[in-house]
Image (cartoon, rainbow, N blue to C red):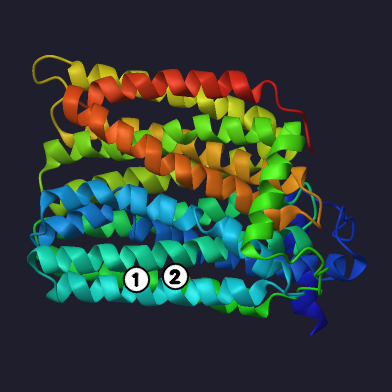
Amino acid sequence: MAAPEISQTRLYEWLTGDEDSRMCRDIPDAACREQPRNFFLHLAASLGNKLADELASARLVLPWLLGAIGAPVWMVGLLVPIREAGALLPQLFVAGLIRRRPERKGVWVVGGAIQALAAAALALLALFGAGGVGGGLVLAALVALSLARGLSSIATKDVLGKTIAKRRRGTLMGWSGSLAGAATLAAGVVLVLVDDRPGELALAALLGIAALGWALNAACAARLAEAPGAVEGGDSVLSALRTGLRLLRDDRAFRDFSLTRALLLSSALALPYLALLGQRQAGDQLGGLGVLVIVSGVAGMLASPAWGKRADASSRRVMGHAALGTAACCLLGALVAWWPGDAAMGVWPHALLYGLLVIVHAGARLGRKTYVVDLAGAEDRALYVALSNTLTGVLMLLVGGLAGALAQWFGPGALLLALAGTALAAAASARRLPEVE
């Protein structure tokens, strides 16, 4: 039994650049001893979650699904707001309930299992759904998936903070993003190869693999060695809301972070519109979707480890650099949208730009995830994460609606130009944040 443990510890030290796996910050000694094992369980769980997120993406895969089953076009516009806001809005209201549990991994397991069931339902709808009824069922399954994602998200970050030490969390998320990018790349290659073959079967297979990814996520979470934590502060929904608003008023660093994160929504909002420009060139063929999935996978594989290392050094700077990158990508996207003639025809120019924004968006996500976990103390981490996500969910609904209206009236180019301005404001806001590493 000793040999596998030694090899696991050595691999952990190699992946993290840590010469002594027993060196820990802000976690108890018992958690420190289990850190190498927990690191790989987190890695596998995150791989399953990230792969499933890509293969059931509201930005790419689900629009193709609605088109394949003949759902009304207006339903496509609801996918991203439901996916994002549905995952973020409820988190403040369940944070106090989760806080009452000395071990929170059970909540994570439940969330992963529900997501797996929702993805399996989407796979069945790809085979048997049709028209408006099928589209409505897709949206209903997406609501369940998104709410379960929110449940898992808050528990995941809380358990991460209890089981993985500072200056290791960004590295963990970086490696998981790289592995998921490689798996997504393989799925994109398969889509390009099937190209014009029956789309319903290929989409059902993708969504079935997504269901397996979330099942892996839940299984790995169940095996984590989590020490019982404090249960003080497990408030009611109303008390959690009052505490959260008081935190937002009194904690300037958290308030400035919330503003920066809100402005960084520009990267998430720009992605589906860049994909939309590519979809207009590719039509409904799965080969076009495959190109976008391949580019997304390569981008995630290249971006995440580099961003993770930099986030461990300064997550504040990572958010600022990602904001500047978002502004550049949005400006290029607007230029492509307005370019005259046939120079921008074909899916590849849009796919390459989409890949660049995926790289930048990975930095924005890793930066803000690492920042909020490191900013909060062990006793308040769940509340910080929940309040931040709930505020972002509200803004996603509001800003997403305005963005859709702007794109409808003036076109995607004008929207991308506006999002570039928002990203520049995010970069300026990130400069005011204190260092927390």
The answer to whether any part of residue 352 appears in the image is no
User: Residue 226's x, y, as percent?
Assistant: 76, 73
Q: Residue at x 7, y 60 (%)?
A: 70
User: Residue 324's x, y, as percent?
Assistant: 51, 21
Position of 142 with respect to 15 (left or right) is: left
Position of 342 with respect to 252 (left or right) is: left
Q: Which residue is mark 2?
A: 213
Q: Residue at x 47, y 67 (%)?
A: 148
- The quadrant in which residue 142 appears is bottom left
Say what secondary structure mark 1 lies in: helix
User: Residue 233's x, y, as percent?
Assistant: 78, 63
Q: Residue at x 25, y 27 (%)?
A: 406
Using a 10 Å C-alpha cutoff, classify the residue at mark 2 as few (fewer than 14 neighbours), some (14 to 19) or many (20 or more): many
Q: Which mark is residue 119?
A: 1
Instruction: Give the mark nearer the N terminus: 2 vs 1.
Output: 1
Marks 2 and 1 sit apart, C-alpha to C-alpha, by: 10 Å
